[in-house]
Image (spheres, rainbow, N blue to C red):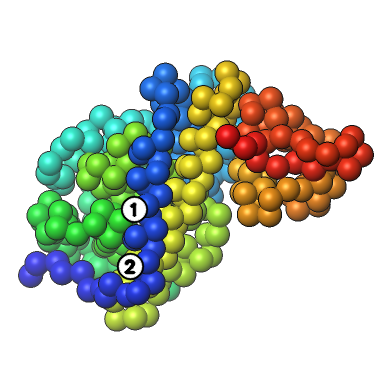
Amino acid sequence: MAYEPRYTISPRLLSLVEAIAALRERIQGAAVELTWLPAMQKDTRTRNTHASTAIEGNPLTLEEVRAIEEGRDFFADPRSKREVVNYLAGLRYVEKHVSKKRIRHEDVFALHRILAEGVMDQGRAGRYRDIPVRVGAYVPPAPGEVSGLMFEFLDWWNHQSTSISPVISSAIVHYRFEAIHPFADGNGRVGRALALWELYRRGFDTHHIFSVDEFYWDDRPRYYSALESVRHEGDDLTSWLEYSAEGLRQTLDRVWLRVQSFSNLTKEKIVLRPKQERLLALLRDIGSMSPAEIWVALDISKQGAMDLIKPLVEAGLIEKVGGKKTGRYQLRKP
């Protein structure tokens, strides 16, 4: 049997896809200097790696993952480091093979070997499982069914998926791979990397600056609940597609902030930290905030707030208006 995903283009899904298209067009049309694209790509690779490995329980922080990406050494559990090194290598593999027109079993094996080598608790890297597995209350297909299901899935991905929006096809790739759960271990990381691969190969993220996995990491219980909802709804993917599209829209909102941080407002360029992104989003929505309002909203100390604010002011992203004691911060006007 051929794989045929079931879903409905609901009004909410259609609205999200339209919003995503508008955001993507704005980002693609932004004057991002080519000299700064590698820095943005490196930052995105780091964020995706941190989020995807953290979802699986890796304890390393974003800054520690960034240190590994930059070749800086520090004391940490060797396995945790290995998972991060593997995922960074896996993303580079995806980036290198972005122009592939056809994804084969061997490509999936190669990606799994990179991501899972040396960190698997069971099974063998680069081989479909020959043992039954369980994911919470969910029991994936029996080992003997895996190869056939993956054949049907890859056939759909290589042919039918090209006729639908990559916003939808990448979410289907993500879910279907997780449902089959073809490997004994490491399926979550591979599934998220494959979904990103679909966005890349369809030309949706031509600059490779979308770190979608941060959305899943921000609220892991909701991520797992969204995956489980498909099974509760008789394999109807509609709610999962809505959730994934919401994640992509929020991701593009973040990317737009990062694009602005790398824009040519000033010679000063910064890599935004998560709380700096939250602050920029608050200023965009509220208009202006006092220092006290900032440290309360971000749940940080007065000094911590100033440590976040100072680089943003120096980079020309925000500005202070008003007097010394009554001053407020707002987004810098073009």
- What residue lies at 22% left-to-right and 74% top-to-bottom? 6
Pick the residue in front: 282 or 94.
282
Q: Which mark is residue 21?
A: 1
**The C terminus - image quarter:** top right
Residue 157 in sight from this viewpoint:
yes
User: Which structural element holds mark 1?
Assistant: helix
The quarter of the picture where residue 325 lies is top right
Pick the residue in front: 187 or 226.
226
Image coords of residue 90 (percent x, y): 34, 35
Characterize the local packing of mark 1: few (<14), some (14-19) or many (20 or more) Cα atoms within 10 angstroms. Answer: some
Residue 134 in sight from this viewpoint:
no
**The N terminus - image quarter:** bottom left
What amino acid does circle 1 point to?
Ala
86 sits to left or right of 80: left
Determine whether 192 is above or below 311 in the image: below
Pick the residue in front: 230 or 296.
296
Which comes before the other along the chain, label 1 or label 2?
Answer: 2
Image coords of residue 85 (percent x, y): 44, 31
Image coords of residue 305 (percent x, y): 78, 39
Q: Which mark is residue 299?
A: none
| Residue designated by label 2 | 14
The quarter of the picture where residue 59 lies is top right
Image coords of residue 272 (percent x, y): 59, 35
Pick the residue in front: 253 or 67.
253
**Circle 1/circle 2 CB separation < 8 Å:** no
User: Which structural element holds mark 2?
Assistant: helix
